[in-house]
Amino acid sequence: MLVKGLLMILVGSLIGWITNYFAIKMLFRPHNEVNILGFKIQGLIPKRRNEMAESIAETIDAELINMKDITGTLDSIEIEDEIDKIVDVVVEDKLKKELLAKIPMAAMFINDSIMNKVKVVVKDAIEENKGEFVGIVLKKLEETVDVKAMVVEKIEGFSLDYMEDLTFKIAKNELKHIEIVGAVLGAVIGAAQFGISYFL
């Protein structure tokens, strides 16, 4: 009876472990639909990949980060230093060089003092209209950049092998625990069956 009881517990544990092991594997396997005795079988994630991508993207867009969050951050960034650098480059490298290239005699009239005055005028004009300019850019970003679509495209671009490796890498310990729990529950069921058969 003891051997019989231990055997039932062992078999129950083995069945529980195998069941959970294959259940975990079938999250991804098989990648493509196969027909076995009239039953169509395909891994859960490959079968519902598009739906999952949409769901993940919606969650990210609604709960984590969206374009309004990004533009809100950009709006708070001080860009005066960047404007100064851009104006310096435009005035020095573009305006001065191109003007002198087209009108060489202009070199007689264009000196550092004049160029600095031009820079100040341009910078002041930009500074006065900075809020409006930034607002237009941010609004355009919100209208044209779709974070949700980008996330969906990115997820759908992952290969199933990559997604499988990534999932098992991240949740390796948790998935192993699921297998162990299956074995423990199987052993408990085996022990219960033995107890029932023993007393009946």
Image (cartoon, rainbow, N blue to C red):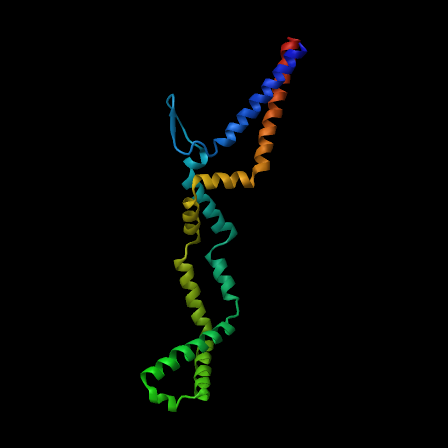
> In which quadrant of the rendered image does the C terminus lie?
top right
- Estimate the x, y position of residue 129 in percent, counting from the top left: 44, 75
> In which quadrant of the rendered image does the N terminus lie?
top right
User: Viewed as shown, does residue 27 lie left or right of 196?
Assistant: left
User: Viewed as shown, does residue 186 lie left or right of 89?
Assistant: right
Indicate whether 95 appears above or below 195.
below
- Estimate the x, y position of residue 37 in percent, counting from the top left: 38, 21
Residue extending farthest to the bottom is: 108
User: Looking at the rendering, which quadrant does residue 101 occupy?
Assistant: bottom left
Q: Which residue is drawn at 44% across and 64% down?
A: 138
User: Looking at the rendering, which quadrant does residue 189 occupy?
Assistant: top right
Indicate whether 67 appears above or below 97.
above
Q: Residue at x 45, y 44 (%)?
A: 55
Q: Residue at x 50, y 39 (%)?
A: 165
**Is 23 in front, or is 58?**
23
- Estimate the x, y position of residue 171 in percent, counting from the top left: 56, 39
**Is 194 in front, or is 72?**
194
Q: Residue at x 50, y 58 (%)?
A: 69
Indicate whether 39 appears above or below 147.
above
- Estimate the x, y position of residue 21 in percent, counting from the top left: 53, 28
